[in-house]
Image (spheres, grey):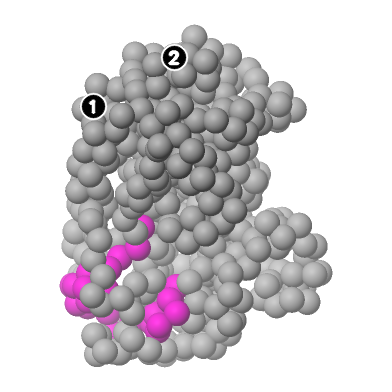
Amino acid sequence: MRITIHRGTHEIGGNCIEITAGNSRIILDVGMPLFKSEGEPYDTANLKRKSKQELLDMGILPKIPGLFVEGQQPDAILLSHAHEDHTGLIRHSEAEIPVYASKGTSKMMKAGEKFALQPTLPRSRYHEINSDEPVQIGDFKLTAYSVDHSIFGAQAFLVEAEGKTVLYSGDLRMHGRKPGMHRSLIEKVSIKKLDVLLMEGTHIGHTEYKGSNEYELEEEITGLIKSAPGLILASFSPQHVDRLVGFLRATKKSGKVFVADAYTAFVMRLIATETSIPKPESTEWVKVFFPKFFLESYERKGMKTFFTFMNPASIGVEEIRSDPSKYVMLFRPSMLDSDFNGKLPDGSRCLYSRWSGYLEQKEWQNTKAKLDQVNGDLIEVHTSGHIYADDIKTLVKAIKAKTVIPIHTFEAERFANVIPNVKLLNDGESFPLA
Ligand SMILES: [Zn+2]
């Protein structure tokens, strides 16, 4: 068996790993890079408009035979979760290659495609991979395990062939709503005598940093909702279902009404059967808001029929303005002008639950200014989707792999400070398992 990391050894995002054994090849993730080699962020919207040839010329698409350039095709692509730094290049891959992902990932990709210009997972190529159910792909035995991350449906992959075993962590954490997942992962893979662990290290360099867990965050959100004088504007990714659950629970505990936008309502409906998420159309304390931008485009996307049955639960800005302190409303800066005509209700409070870097962007600076005008405030309530440095140490120790290869990190060298058996690779470099 041979592992090649085409990208992700010295950056956060853009993961792409190739594993070969016998006559078989598989690809783990086909991520869009987030950062240039100098650490400056890419304009990903711009990258999405580029042609395949342009992306090849720029070095964004690794020249992997049969995947992005001519050659024998790999047996499969596996997607660990629906974040674009793991899926973003799928549309440039050869159209005959089967794609394996969890049902949750396929649902998040469907929502992301319809509402957030995210990549499509073509139905004809899709193979569902359920956690804990091994599948045979060529010479590989593949087992997916559910992991806790800031998006629904995330998985780690165990790859077995030629008597060797490799675990790819994908993105994960130990401070989410489902700590049972990492306990179960440890239990199932520690007995496998892993040869290699490909381990995400987003926070490996932040040894002092440890934020709240999702339960503590829910408490914090509840307090901030209860103490707010006016409308609550909630900003978070609806694909981060655990955060959605936190906001829903906090809203209910505060005796308020949750106003989902169409995107969030769509996600709630998609997963209502497999989670305890309330159905928006039949829950008294949940309403659905259709932003103007969405109303203008949903007909052309064929979404009108889907939402008809939610119409009885719909709510408009006027109703919200008549009693703003009653509502916790999903918010995007684009709603400011088109839906609120540039003026928010007095004393509005925005609970910002995303990466703080986005607050530098013009749309958020503008939102802050509009909140100031009405004596409102913006409060950050967030916790990372990635495992803390201390927890990396705990997890790696418990999994007991012979070799640990860092991925999804700017500070791969730091692994060696806390873990004894680290092997650093560079992008494009292979690690043979004899
Ligand atoms: Zn991720």
Asked if disc 1 and disc 2 are in contact, CB closer than 8 Å, the reply is: no
Q: Residues within 10 Å of mark 1 (few under 14, many from 20)?
A: some
Residue at 39% x, 45% y: name it: 378
- Dividing the picture into quadrants, the one containing residue 58 is bottom right
Q: Judge: label 2 CB < 8 Å from ligand 1.
A: no
Residue 229 part of the magenta-drawn span:
no
Viewer can see residue 415: yes
> The residue tagged with tag 1: helix, strand or loop?
loop
Residue at 40% x, 84% y: name it: 412
Viewer can see residue 395: no
Image coords of residue 161 (percent x, y): 42, 73
| Depth check, front residue: 67 or 53 | 53
Task: Name the residue type under label 1.
Answer: Ser
Cα separation between marks 1 and 2: 19 Å
Q: Is residue 385 left or right of residue 218?
A: right
Q: State which region is magenta.
A: 385-412
Image coords of residue 434 (percent x, y): 42, 90
